[in-house]
């Protein structure tokens, strides 16, 4: 499916809003304009991403909102459009209703994803407030917009969109592009205020964007459960970024989820809370440092023995062990063999952000063999990252866990000669590293 053609089709139409929003608008229209409380209409728009979507389209041509530094908020949009004009525009919007192509089950999934946008918006606002950010209103709107392309895909592609498979992955497969790229194209094509691109553009340098992305990823994967390493690692990243405790970040997720469920504009808004209630009731405590789980002297002995075998028996020219530093949620070089003195990797901290190469690798015990073309691609994708600084050679890496706790990462390559890593050497590398945490 061609994304450009599909987005132009979306741009040529207007879309329904939630039934609860339609009823609330009908009640407002019965009142005299002077008696309508401006904040009520603003809150109504924020509670229904489809309604907000229609409002943002109405002002997309505004020069004031198309500057990168525009102060974008629902209040500013309503003031710009005018109360009478907005109510007149909304008067024509139908309510979202089941039909021959739109089942009740599909509407439930669609509103579930709208509810997750709301949770992500609450999380981003809370985390930015904890980080003492000055502007949060535009981040809230960006979070509400993020899941809209997926929701409209559910509406317009009933035959292709399957309800029992991850929605964002389906959208990426259908359009053969990363979902974040589709969101950017969605904002540009419909169009929506360009100020949103500052937060939704993957190349944006806005420091708030990372927390927004973490909030959306957290909300969109609530059903995974806090015990999953990937999900828990995301919360640890947030805690490290804003200098908060892990428990505080987890409680913010609980509160945001419950806030959306308690003020549900549609039954699907409560689905995430149901997933949360079905999980074990206690939040995970902050992970104990590796030393509390495995005696330092034993771990050090095991690591040194492993490094010796990797270099002497398997003949790897560079062997590195990056130790997990729990307070900063990052990797730091602890042992090295074959790395030149003064190398940039010596004192580097490698943050475990969820979308980075090491962030994904360290989500669970696993290994990877990266061929030269892929290494070059990783270096280009993460400038000044570990792979680029290491020289973008063919390499193998494996996340080492001591029980449920990340201990660090083993990295090996043949940087001096460029000799490829054979399949047998890779298998022996995995076996040797895996032995490091077996009972002795």
Image (cartoon, rainbow, N blue to C red):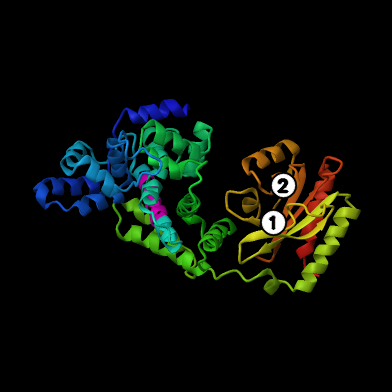
Query: Residue 155 at x, y = what percent?
Result: 36, 36
Residue 281, magenta (yes or no)? no
Location of residue 362 with respect to 52 vertically, above or below: below
The residue to which callout 2 is attached is 389
- Which one is earlier in the sequence, the residue at label 1 or at label 2? 1
Callout 1: helix, strand or loop?
Answer: loop
Secondary structure of the residue carrying numbered label 2: helix
Callout 2 crowding tier (Cα within 10 Å): few <14, some 14–19, many ≥20: some
Which quarter shows the C terminus?
bottom right
* Dot 1 alpha-carbon crowd within 10 angstroms: few under 14, some 14 to 19, many 20 or more: some
User: Residue 318: percent from the left, percent from the top?
Assistant: 83, 51
Specify the segment rendered in magenta.
Answer: 110-122
Q: Position of residue 59 (x, y in %)?
A: 28, 37
Residue position marked by numbered label 1 in the rendering: 348
Looking at the rendered structure, the number of numbered marks drawn on it comes to: 2
Q: Quote the CA–CA distance across marks 1 and 2.
A: 10 Å
Drawn side of residue 318 relative to residue 97, left or right? right
Name the quadrant containing residue 9: top left
Looking at the image, which residue sits at the far right? 312
């Amino acid at each position: 499916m061609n994304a450009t053609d599909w987005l132009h089709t979306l741009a040529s139409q207007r879309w329904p809003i939630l039934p609860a929003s339609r009823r609330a608008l009908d009640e407002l229209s019965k009142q005299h304009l002077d008696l309508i409380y401006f904040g009520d209409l603003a809150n109504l728009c924020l509670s229904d991403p489809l309604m907000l979507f229609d409002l943002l389209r109405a002002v997309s041509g505004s020069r004031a909102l198309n500057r990168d530094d525009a102060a974008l908020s629902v209040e500013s949009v309503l003031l710009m459009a005018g109360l009478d004009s907005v109510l007149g525009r909304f008067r024509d919007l139908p309510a979202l209703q089941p039909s021959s192509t739109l089942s009740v089950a599909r509407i439930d999934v669609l509103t579930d994803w709208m509810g997750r946008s709301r949770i992500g918006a609450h999380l981003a606002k809370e985390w930015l407030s904890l980080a003492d950010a000055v502007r949060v209103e535009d981040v809230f709107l960006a979070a509400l917009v993020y899941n809209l392309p997926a929701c409209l895909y559910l509406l317009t592609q009933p035959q292709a969109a399957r309800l029992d498979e991850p929605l964002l992955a389906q959208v990426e497969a259908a359009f053969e592009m990363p979902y974040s790229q589709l969101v950017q194209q969605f904002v540009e094509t419909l169009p929506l205020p360009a100020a949103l691109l500052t937060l939704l553009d993957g190349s944006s340098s806005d420091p708030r964007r990372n927390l927004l992305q973490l909030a959306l990823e957290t909300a969109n994967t609530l059903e995974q459960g806090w015990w999953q390493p990937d999900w828990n690692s995301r919360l640890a990243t947030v805690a490290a970024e804003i200098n908060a405790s892990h428990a505080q970040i987890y409680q913010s997720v609980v509160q945001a989820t419950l806030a959306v469920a308690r003020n549900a504009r549609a039954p699907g808004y409560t689905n995430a809370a149901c997933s949360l209630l079905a999980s074990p009731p206690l939040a995970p405590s902050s992970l104990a440092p590796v030393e509390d789980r495995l005696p330092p002297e034993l771990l050090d002995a095991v690591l040194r023995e492993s490094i010796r075998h990797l270099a002497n028996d398997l003949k790897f020219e560079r062997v590195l062990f990056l130790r997990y530093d729990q307070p900063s949620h990052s990797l730091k070089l602890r042992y090295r063999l074959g790395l030149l003195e003064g190398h940039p990797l010596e004192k580097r901290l490698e943050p475990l952000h969820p979308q980075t190469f090491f962030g994904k690798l360290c989500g669970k015990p696993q290994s990877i063999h990266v061929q030269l073309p892929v290494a070059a691609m990783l270096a280009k994708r993460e400038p000044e990252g570990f792979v680029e600084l290491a020289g973008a050679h063919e390499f193998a890496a494996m996340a080492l866990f001591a029980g449920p706790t990340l201990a660090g990462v083993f990295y090996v390559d043949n940087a001096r000669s460029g000799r490829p890593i054979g399949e047998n050497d890779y298998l022996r590398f995995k076996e040797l590293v895996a032995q490091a945490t077996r009972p002795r």
